[in-house]
Amino acid sequence: MADGPHTAPAPESAAVQPMNMIQALNSALHVKMAEDDNVLSFGEDTGYFGGVFRVTDQLQQKHGLTRSFDTPISECGLVAAAIGMGAYGLRPVVEIQFADYIYPAYDQIVSEAAKLRYRSGGQFTSPIVVRSPYGGGIFGGQTHSQSPESLFTHVAGLKVVIPSNPYDAKGLLIAAIEDDDPVIFFEPKRLYNGPFDGWHKNPVSPWKAQESAQVPTGKYVVPIGEAKVVREGSDVTVLCYGTMVWVSLAAAVYAGVDAEVIDLRTLVPLDIATIEASVKKTGRCVIVHEAPKTSGYGAELSALVQERCFYHLEAPIARVAGWDTPYPHAFEWEYFPGPERVGAALKSVMTGGPR
């Protein structure tokens, strides 16, 4: 498969080295903590231990106990502390060990962080980043595989970011830390150590073989709110993010369809202009995400495409998603939207869609 998503290369003067997504995110945190004393990192086991996936490795050793520290097992408490810190000038980056455990903090995120700028008439902001690994593909079962992104895209005042490769991960995390509004930053755990195209029986592919893993060691920013066309095509537009970007690229090859694949990168704010231009060109649209289909983010995307591109559509919009069940451990790959399911959708819209 051709190289997946990447952005414009860094200036030649910048040092570049291959990184996996863990290393890229870790680099982003080191860069911002070295640059700005107001940037903090904390969460459960994120200090001394370096996080369950080691994204915060060596932050405490390099930047000190007051800037990288462990918290009690209380998602509500650590996010509440971050909101207070942000209101008084700090820029906390908090980690929820798995997105499945973000729900105890939901009230603080929705009722406090998202509303602070509005309710204070702009006197206070909540410049916090809530990082969390999300999604399936690692046999995490029902409590370590969920994709709750749509719960946050529904909330005014929040930004929602999901990278699909190391280059974007670092640049988007730096942008999120510098943003004055709260950012929910979901990290596809299946992509931490390498791209994954959904063919789970194939050998693991390392990041070092991908152009998008060539990451500048210094500071750079990938702007929030800009999607990326990662594969140009003329037959159908595929809208996806996170792990599903790689699955969609594989599905296009598997189905033999000239698909244009768009990595959204940011769900809120959404780059609707890039989506609209692509769908008007291809006349067809397939939307792919891991979360359950009912009320998933694909429903919002489908509505937006229908509203803006109705007279250009030559087939019904198709959605490929997780099933409306808890994430099953024993039937991981039946639940996970793989290239066969996505490929079937691509072929379906090319023949006019289901009848």
Image (cartoon, rainbow, N blue to C red):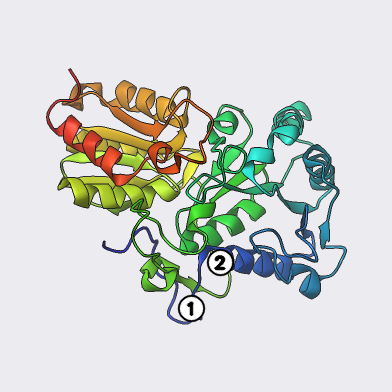
- Tag 2, which secondary structure? helix
Q: Is residue 306 above or below residue 139?
A: above
| Figure quadrant of the N terminus | bottom left
Compute the Cα span from label 2 to label 1.
11 Å
Residue 261 image offset from top left, x and y in percent: 29, 47
* Residue in the picture at 37% in, 26% down: 304
Toward the left, the furthest residue is: 351
Residue 208 image offset from top left, x and y in percent: 42, 73
Q: Nearer the viewer, mark 2 or mark 1?
A: 2
- Tag 1, which secondary structure? strand
| Figure quadrant of the C terminus | top left
Numbered badge on residue 24: 2
Residue type highlighted by circle 1: Val
Q: Is residue 145 above or below residue 223?
A: above
Q: Nearer the viewer, residue 328 or 299?
A: 328
Residue 233 appears in the figure: no
What is the count of numbered marks?
Answer: 2
Q: Nearer the viewer, residue 121 or 161?
A: 161
State the image quarter where residue 275 is shown: top left
| Relative side of 155 to 49, left or right | left
Numbered badge on residue 16: 1
* Residue in the picture at 29% in, 28% down: 318
State the image quarter where residue 54 is shown: bottom right
Residue 286 image offset from top left, x and y in percent: 29, 34
* Residue in the picture at 50% in, 64% down: 193
| Relative side of 37 to 228, left or right | right
Q: Is residue 108 above or below residue 97?
A: above
Residue type highlighted by circle 2: Ala
